[in-house]
Image: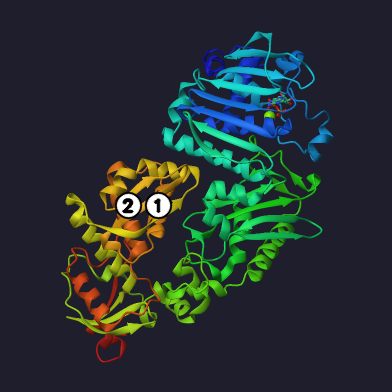
Amino acid sequence: MDLFQPFLALRYNIFMPIQLLSEEVASQIAAGEVVERPSSAVKELIENSLDAGADQITILIREAGKRLIEVVDNGDGIPAEELNLAVHRHATSKLKYAADLFRVSTLGFRGEALASIGSVSHLTLLSRVQKEDKGASIRVEGGDIKPASLLGIPPGTTVRVEHLFYNVPARLKFLKTDRTEKRHINDIVSRYGLANPGVRLKLYQDDDLVFQTSGSGDQREVIAAVYGVETARQMIGVLSEDNILRVDGFISPPGLTRSNRREILFFVNQRPVQDPALTKALTQAYHTLLMKGRYPIAVLFLKLSPEKVDVNVHPTKAEVRFEDKGEVFRSIGRAVRRALLAHTPVSEVGNLGGVKLWGGPAPDHRDVRRVIDPAWELAKDTRDEGVFGAPIESGQLPAAMGTPILRLIGQVALTYLIAEGPDGLYLIDQHAAHERILFEKFISLRDNKPPSQVLLESIVVEFSPSSADLVNEQLELLCEIGFDLEAFGPGAFVIRAVPALLQGTSPEGILRAAVEDLEENETPLERNIEEKIIARVCKRAAVKAGQILSPEESRKLLLDLEACQSPRTCPHGRPTMIHLSVDLLERKFGRTGPM
Ligand code: ADP
Ligand code: MG
């Protein structure tokens, strides 16, 4: 069956009368909206299981869902005589009247999912309601329903989706790599896990148990399963309620951040939603506590009366519409700020300089500094501007101009080195410069594996299932650049050695940095991956702005920078130095020429 046949016919035969699309074609069109990729099918099936009151759901995936998606639950089941209906479009047991739409409390209600999935896969439904002693099954192939047969199975429902998109090659072609599709599935399952701590979830990918929750009802336990025990331990609880909204969940302290928004999760009445405005309400509440480009981790549940939110604005219900958006956002902001204020920052300040006064891991140094050092604020604000209001761009420093020989004068704002060079004054960003130095050292050592530094005590780092996937995939590469790293149970890795160049930096921080970068690029070019990881790792390991450097350290930095092949930019392309030529100084002081 060719999905586009009817449209082609319309173009070529103007006498074709208007007719209703066949059920089959209509379903395939709808399937395009509901089932975009394997993870969307997983989402719909989990929602159905939750709607059926299941408290145990097992998900089996093969070949990133293209070969098999099977969801087994212990919910209410579907009566044998209704199995046929369940796979019909607009057949639902959850909604009867249009008015019900405005107080939907189940996750599904459109009656579209099974019909849509059935039209683009080989779908088998097996189900038994609790009170019957036999169950029944039906099979749908490309929209054709095979008659039901009775059989002995445990109570609950199993939905088996095989050969997804077998009849929609275009869809198959647009799927990303298996790794990416698996990651989407992992993300979806962990999201529903977070929203339903009382449900025992298990996810298998090609026979490996990659994620599971106990169903104990403990939210923090699920957070630990998704983000690792250490992250879960640090997360701050949020709980507040006003007459509009109840907000509860967990947010990270300011020292625990990520380089992207992927770990900010919102749920509206238990439904995962993606709304940039909600994310903004959250990050704004952190205000000055976050560095530019850093984001918190958050798992926040918003509860409000179903009449105040419209969930029927999106085919997969990923977006919602609030009756009073502004109120909702203000509520979130208040709840988050209150939680952050109640969380005393003392322990983090105690951690500064690597001296742990209060136990726990050292937080991300850069984030904390904002809280305590006004000089940093000042330094940052002038970072991108020229001095004395004159825009001085790195463009004035063509890379072709050789490496200047620099004489150290001092350090300013704990961030910039001041040096005298062959033609005037140089301001050097100590962080960017060190990044460049480390990067070039790495690259020059690349062909004969950079030396490793064995750790006195090996360190176990935990990742979410999808990040763990990435680490596994790049394990060889990470070892090539000097890590000694090994899988250590589901989602965990043990670090035994780090690249010697990075001595003195938190091994966990370095590894996380490398992974964060991979996550941002769904399909990075293989040949670039290594340099990307190295650049990211160097960024993490480089001396930070705000760090006091002794004159010896500063001089060493300048010498090392002089030895670089491309000393004028950091590996990410930012300038390492600003040059104020003698000529410019003279003009500024009105000694020569026009101002
Ligand atoms: P919707 O969830 O929007 O109602 P679906 O196509 O997803 O539409 O499902 C159709 C119907 O099949 C549901 O309304 C429900 O009655 C039944 N059903 C589907 N999956 C399950 C399940 N896992 N357990 C019990 N009933 C189910
Ligand atoms: Mg459904």
467 and 580: which is toward the camera: 467
The 10 Å Cα crowd at callout 1, few under 14, some 14 to 19, many 20 or more, is some
Q: Does 71 sit above or below residue 550?
A: above
**Quarter holding ligand 2:** top right
Q: Measuring 66% from the left and 18% from the top, which residue is drawn there? A: 126
- The answer to whether the residue bearing label 1 lies less than 8 angstroms from the nearest atom of ligand 2 is no
* Residue 438 coordinates in the image, percent (x, y): 26, 63
User: Which quadrant of the figure has residue 238?
Assistant: bottom right
User: Which residue is labeled 2 in the image?
Assistant: 532
User: Which residue is labeled 1 in the image?
Assistant: 517
* Residue 209, visible in the rendered structure: yes
Q: Amino acid at mark 1?
A: Asp
Is 131 on the left-hand or right-hand side of 373? right
Is 431 on the left-hand or right-hand side of 380? left
Q: Measuring 67% from the left and 38% from the top, which residue is drawn there? A: 199
* Residue 88, visible in the rendered structure: no
Is 79 on the left-hand or right-hand side of 508? right
The 10 Å Cα crowd at callout 2, few under 14, some 14 to 19, many 20 or more, is some
Count the marks: how many?
Answer: 2
Contact? badges 2 and 1 (CB < 8 Å): yes
Q: Amino acid at mark 2?
A: Lys
